[in-house]
Each structure stands twice: as structure tokens, then as C-alpha cells.
Image (cartoon, grey):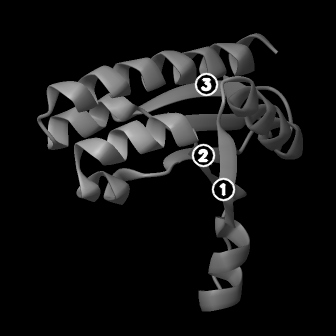
Amino acid sequence: MFGLTVHRKQNFEKTISDATEALKTEGFGVLTTIDVQNTLKEKIGVDFKRYTILGACNPSFAHRALQTSDEIGLLLPCNVVVTEEKNGETKVSIFDPLTMTKIVENPELEKIAKEVQEKLLRVVHSLHVH
């Protein structure tokens, strides 16, 4: 697994709103929003479930990570995926930054990844309890 996941009974729009707010509380902004369902429909005529990718970034942590290696940018921003499940519930999956440390061996990056993971775990917890 390379993600932190929470299942919610809230609807899709509410979950996106709550996820965005929880990320903001932890110092993350959403830089990009990709509506996968709409994109697949428009580009290749495929019907797909509601699926949105939020590109979240915490500028301070991104800056610190980029100082360890220019190529870390390949792993940024931190993707947050919101999907609508068949039962009408939603699922939020957040990229676990510790996954980066399996790709790039760097003690400084590992320290940063652990700090970011703590923040993202609080996001997941916030979404779980609300």
C-alpha cells in the first residue's frame, strides 16, 4: 500500500469540501483538481465513476523536499483521490509520503516525509470522525 485511506458516509461533494478544509487546516493548499470522470467522458467517451484527484501542497515541506533533490518534484504534489463508491459512500486516499523514501534513499527526505505523514494522518483522522 502507498496510500492512507478513509471511507465516509458523506456524499461526494461534501467529502471533497471536507478533504480540502482538512488539508488547509494542516497547511496544505489544493493546487490542482482533476475531474477524472469528466475527462474520460470528454476525451475517450468512457463512463467512469465519480473520481477526483486533488493535488495538495504544503509549500514549506515542498521547499525542504526539493532541497534534497531536484527530482523530488516528480513525486509532488501530494495526490489526494476522492471516489464515489457503488453504495453512495465515498473513499479518500492520500499518497503516503513515506513511499518516497522507498524510492529515494535520503535521511533528510525521510525526516521530512515523516513530518508530512503526521499531518496527513491528522487529515485522515479528521475525515474519519466527521
- Residue 121 in view: yes
Residue at the image point whose x is 61% and y is 25% from the top: 6
**Image quadrant of residue 113?**
top left
> How many numbered marks have been drawn onto this rendered protein structure?
3
Is 117 left or right of 68, judged from the image as shown? right
> Between 28 and 41, which is closer to the camera in this rendering?
28
The C terminus - image quarter: top right
Mark drawn on residue 56: 2
Mark 1 touches mark 2? (CB < 8 Å): yes
Query: Which amino acid type corresponds to the residue marked 1 in the rendered image?
Result: Leu
Q: Which residue is mark 3?
A: 6
Q: Which amino acid, by three-letter code, is at mark 3?
A: Val
Q: Earlier in the sequence, mark 1 or mark 3?
A: 3
Residue 119 lies, in percent from the top left, at: 55, 20
In the rendered image, which residue does mark 1 sit on?
A: 31
Q: Residues within 10 Å of mark 3 (few under 14, many from 20)?
A: some
